[in-house]
Amino acid sequence: MREFPWRKILLLLLFIYLTFFSVSKAIETEPPVETSSAVQWFNPQRINVFIILILFFAFVLYFIQRAKKGESLFVRRIAGLDAIEEAAGRAAEMGKPILYISGIEDMDNLQTVASMIILGNVAELVASYDVPLLVPICVPFVLTVAEESVKQGYVKAGRPEAYNPNNVKYLTQEQFAYAAGVSGIMLREKPAANFMFGSFFAESLLMAETGFSTGAIQVAGTANIHQLPFFVVACDYTLIGEELYAASAYLSREPKLLGSLKGSDLAKFLIMIILLLGVVLESFGITKFSSWFFVQ
Amino acid sequence: MSLEEGKIMGTEEIIWNAVATFLTLCIFTFLYKDNPFYKFAEHLVVGVSAGYFAVILYYNGFVPKLITPLRQGEWVYIIPAILGLMIWTRFSKKWSWISRFSLAFYIGSGTGFAIPLYMQNYVIRQLSSTMLPVGFTTWALFTNILIIIGVLSALIYFFFSKEHTGFFGGTAKVGIWTLMVGFGTGFGLTVMGRVSLLAERVVFLREYFIELKYYLYILFKYGLPLS
């Protein structure tokens, strides 16, 4: 078992403190002579966000290093993700396609980024089963990324010739028109499995309910909490919130992704300790600790 | 214009509302099964919206964010223009690899912007708001205990490094129950919103058919279509 690099992390934190706290103190102590606006490279009022981010990155980098050295990192079983392979097998048996929906947000949304990574893994799996993978896309830029992900998946599976660019297609950027288009594909192509991973809004139930009516196995995942109830009721398996981000690491077992998953687990543990400490101090009337976490 | 506003529809409104009514009914036929009417409405809305968004992107994106700044001599905008043009290399099998630079730039910058925002809004703000005083002296302090237990057990559910067994598994179960209670509440709230949308559509159809009845009555009785 490797020793945790506390010394490096402490030195890093000390560096952050000396650099930015001293800057913020200098700004605070200056007498307010006149006011004027100027471009700021650093907002000293958000130092808490910066420190927590650095700490989070340190955790992630530490675990990535461990994973790269070949250490086996345990990740618990996630039922919804095991179902993906089961669904692909079922599609192969039935000779029907698989439908993958990546949500309706652009690539600047982390859920769409996670969805594209999952798409690559699903494409790799589907390529080995030799069933068509249909990917209707809502946002134009996501189309190019999705094409690339699917193509990479087929290449990784050793079957680049099986990749059909016509199966990854742009429908429309309008939310409900996209939902109508996807529902049409579900009804006409009758996919054996529907995968819905990404950022969804009011169209989630329309698509999930149509998919349910066609009898397809449905696996969905989103971090949009208002849409999760619809997926829970209409899909066979649902990835809730962070499980969506964990999915890419779980499926690929890549050191970088596994490292970030383990790093986020450690961050969650730290958050729980901070939360408990904050609650105890607040209960005794000490508010200084919790006020440090206040973001303006 | 509607009956409630005390006015009767003219010929133009009757025609355009007939289109809206027809398309609404076409979509409602989906409740029976897939059919040519639904297919027609679906293809129409997908096609029209795709064209509409192409125009929107041109006038709200391409012109104000590239053409106008370049005309004003802000040459730095040539960089995104080149990145945009690089995407077009996807049409060539030989040069399509060039488009990956644009993809990498967009995904990298997008993620870079998103991570601090997520951390700020979904982690630190939540953490700060959950640091609540607890106790048994008042009802508010007691409910805070429930909030803390719910948050901690839900966090435990999202631990991937440990199998959900024993005490840990029990706590994770409390966490998933907490989440399901929240989902149930959200489901009920949203379904009520959807029912109100359906009610609005039904009212629209009802009003249209009443208006149509008046219009046809006036047309056949007096032979004068309303303008």
Image: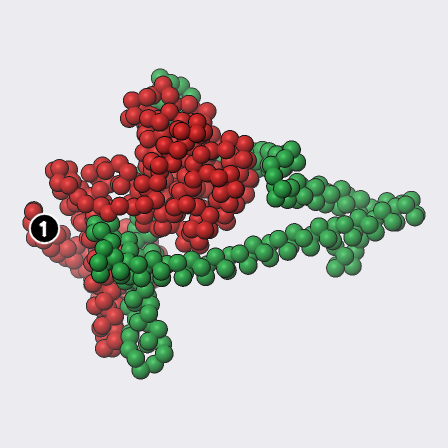
Task: Out of A191 and A257, give the one closest to the viewer.
Answer: A191
Q: Position of residue A119 (x, y in %)?
A: 36, 35
Q: Residue furthest front?
A: A93
The residue carrying mark 1 is: A4
Q: Specify the quadrant of the image occupied by residue B17.
A: top right
Q: Is residue B226 above or below residue B74?
A: below
Q: How has the structure been colored for display?
A: by chain
* Colour that chain B carries in the picture: green
How busy is the neighbourhood of tag 1: few (under 14 within 10 Å), some, or many (20 plus)?
few
Q: Position of residue B94 (x, y in %)?
A: 35, 17
Q: Position of residue A145 (x, y in %)?
A: 38, 32
- Mark 1 residue element: loop
Q: Residue furthest right?
A: B222
Q: Is residue A181 left or right of residue A114?
A: right
Please name the residue shown 24% across and 49% down the image. Answer: B160
Task: Out of B126 and B172, give the one closest to the viewer.
Answer: B172
Q: Is residue A172 visible?
A: no
Q: Specify the quadrant of the image occupied by residue B73.
A: top left
Task: Out of A272 and A45, give the one closest to the viewer.
Answer: A272
Q: Position of residue A249 (x, y in %)?
A: 26, 41
Amino acid type at image mark 1 = Phe
Label 1 is found on which chain of the structure? A
* Colour that chain A carries in the picture: red
Q: Is residue B164 left or right of residue A7?
A: right
Please name the residue shown 78% across and 59% down the image. Answer: B6
Q: Residue furthest bottom?
A: B137
Q: Is residue A247 visible?
A: yes
Please name the residue shown 64% across and 55% down the image. Answer: B200
Please name the residue shown 39% across and 58% down the image. Answer: B180
User: In this figure, what is the number of numbered marks?
Assistant: 1
